[in-house]
Image (cartoon, coloured by chain):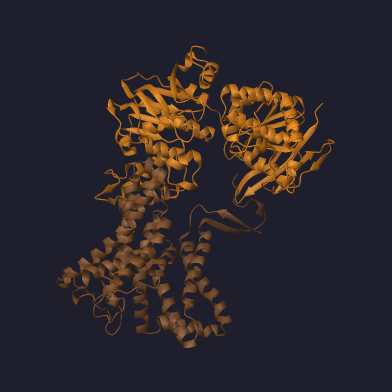
Chain colours: A brown, B orange
Amino acid sequence: MIRLEPRASVPPLVAAAVPVGAGVAALALAAVPLMLAGVDVGRAFALMAGGALGSTFAVTETLTRATPLVFTGLAAAVAFRARLWNIGGEGQLYAGALAAVAVGAGAVTLPPLLMVPLVVVAGMLAGALLMVVPTIMRTRFGVDEVVTTLLSNFVVVLFVSMMLDGPLKDPMGGGWPQSAPILAEAELPRLVAQTRLHAGLVMALAAALLVYGLDRFTVWGFEARAVGLNPAAARFAGLRVNATFLRVGALSGALAGLAGVSEVIGLKGYLTTDLSPGFGYTGIVVAMLAMLNPLGVVASAVFLAAVFVGADSMGRALGVSTYIASLIVALSLVSMLVGQMFLTWRVRLGRGAAAAGGRP
Amino acid sequence: MSLPVLDIDRVTKRFGALLANDAVSLSLDRGEVLALLGENGAGKTTLMSILFGHYVADEGEVRVAGPDGRMAPLPPGSPKAAIAAGIGMVHQHFALADSLSAFDNIVLGTEPLWRPWRAPRPERQRLEGLMADSGLAVDLAVPAGRLTVGERQRVEILKALYRDARILVLDEPTAVLTPQEADGLFATLDKLTARGLSVIFISHKLGEVLAVADRVAVLRQGRKVFEAANDGLDRGTLAEAMVGRPLAPPQRPAVRRGPPVLVLDGVGVPGRQGRAGLEAAELTVHAGEVVGIAGVSGNGQEALAAVISGLAAPTAGRVLVDGAPLAPRPAAAVAAGIGRIPEDRHRDGVVGDMSVEENLVLEDLFGPGTQRRGLLRFGAIRRRALKAIADYDVRCPGPAAKVRALSGGNMQKLLLARALEPEPTLVVAAQPSRGLDIGATQAVHARLLAACARGAAVLLISEDLDELMALSDRLYVIFHGRLAEAGSPDALDVRRIGLMMAGQPAEAA
């Protein structure tokens, strides 16, 4: 018989093993549809690994793909730590990207040392604003932010589409709904020549370190954790509950906005409505896999990016649909949710199963 | 002649390394009231859960008398079998559906599932017969949510009797009752036991155990350590058996009464969710005195604690602390030198998933001892926690342990350390010993009296009259949001306070 006992504390080894185990489980479960598709599973995984990590080019592609995921993963982790459910990363990403082209595609011209920060700040403000509104609606009126942020994604993407067919449409774009290219002064430099890897990765890593430091060492992070874990006790103790939610919401939105900025000024150079293949949503999986740890976000973003890039190249080689990548991401989330059970419960084998979780 | 109806035979139950019940044997005779005493974690609830089929014993057996009086083993792990064998349980927290009538609540679950229509007449007749026989009168048509606590308890007992209970387990039945309502319950129990019902009465109020029980059994650390007929027993003997060591009653220190620290001047606070607020409350607490607030739960105690803790703004009147009006913010209350012990320590007191040291600095997060330029001072926080853990005897694995894993008593000691360490001029303690065992309760009392001896004004809001009588210099009674001064406990008797708690004016009482 199997019994579950509540854990008093989580051993570090278990805490590390759960996300790794979830990733492995997701890959193992993905073998089933691969087999059903009639391909050699071993070869498929070998091709995936090679495609994601097998060459300098493959590694730079994986890191390029990981960059926006670090931002959106951080956005989700910051908010979720305070129990603020920001599901609007996708919309905030597009809002950031829209602000970046609105400012960076000719409206203002400054030297690069000023231009890049200006575009970055504009994108962060746009993302923050988009998250601040649902946060205020929650703290003031009790409106569920899961619903408002989720729905805002569609509104923002449609708004972007409208702008790209209207005021922001590139007159030289040959009729395609895309923005004018951003100025060269606003572009981020490439990190490795002949590849797509850009300085957005450095920004993402800096953001992860900053968020980690904020969370771990400052009063600000302490307050956010306390408010998230027990708002009633935080209020009783005199912490500024609503102000904390606002700050957390603004930071989360700004981080998601940065994902859009970095994609536009680092990678694409202009904005279209297919800028993001769901980076905002995948960010939630990234954050969950990282157990909301800002440094863990970097690792899980690289893992999921490798899955995407590897599955792409494997799919091309074997003729398997690249949806397998989305499947693995989804399986990772499910495995992680299941795996979290091991963090709160300790599994014991023995008799007396009727007393699951019982305390005298 | 005694007829056994229940025989718990050497029941052992382990939870991991913890021995919750260690070969506990108990027997119960027809028409007998057996009081089961023990501190939190002594194994009372585990034993009753085994009896009711929620847990399965690791060893041992439970035997119950059938209708013919023959003892037969009770199938383990089946609440259904327990009910069928005539065991009824009334929990401390009632399990009634508020929107259903008392009648529906009682009958619920006994009607055949596949009968599409209802034929309430024979059931109502049977129930009215039961009420007449037992003296348990309830208006059956009223929704349970509109009944008083005492009436709801009667519905719960009727529910058990309606299911032909021959053994009734009452878990802390008087915790929510006024002394008069408790007397009513005891009279009912007398009537029911005279008709052959057997009762297991779980309590930690020694006075009422002595008043109502035929026999007393005490559990400590999973073992039955004491059992005797209630014949010449006294409180001291039982308390010692529960705690395992001799106990000294709290000593009120002789302190000179100082100037007024807390003044409520015509304070009004609106009630919330069916619980009373405050109406034109007048209250003064001086330095160096303990003022007790007696009352039945839900009569405005929450509003009183909230308005002094900075959680609620008065809609009328003024709250003065050291002569200055108190701003309705918790941080302002902390800054004004108010040490606060919240009523619901899990909800308002601690952040369970944060560590002991983090919880200890929660009220002083912006103080120079906790942070410098927004950065947390981990060394200072750790040193402070180690001192508080030692000074207040907080039993925990360490300062980094999560508070969720602490027992209620240790959680409360942590909150005492947080509230009292800054040497507040005013202490507001709401139900500070609720749910705590005798040892932890004593520690709480000693700390409150020590604060008073230091010169703090202490406001003690409690539903435990024994506690109030032992600690308070002056008593107020709260009823329907109105405060009435009752005077010094030395010159008062419990009856009179009980009448005031039930809403009778002091003069008439």
Quadrant position of residue B96: top right
**Residue A278 at what x, y percent from top left?**
40, 70
Q: Which residue is drawn at 35% across and 84% down?
A: A57
Q: Which of B306 and B55 is in front in this view?
A: B306
Q: Which residue is drawn at 51% across and 28% down?
A: B463
Quarter occupied by the C terminus of chain A: top right
Q: Is residue B117 visible?
A: yes
**Residue B250 at what x, y percent from top left?**
48, 25
Q: Which residue is drawn at 57% across and 54% down?
A: A5
Please indicate whether residue B112 sits to the left or right of residue A343 in the image. Answer: right
Quadrant position of residue A128: bottom left
Q: Residue furthest top?
A: B507
Quadrant position of residue B312: top left
Q: Look at the picture and state if A108 lies above or below B463.
A: below
Q: Which of A60 and B277 is in front in this view?
A: B277
State the count of labels.
Answer: 0
Q: Nearer the viewer, residue A351 or B51?
A: B51
**Residue B203 at what x, y percent from top left?**
61, 31
Q: Is residue B357 visible?
A: no
Quarter occupied by the N terminus of chain A: bottom right
Please indicate whether residue B329 sits to the left or right of residue A311 in the image. Answer: left
**Residue A107 at what x, y percent from top left?**
18, 70
Q: Look at the picture and state if A70 lies above or below B135.
A: below
Q: Which of A63 and A89 is in front in this view?
A: A89
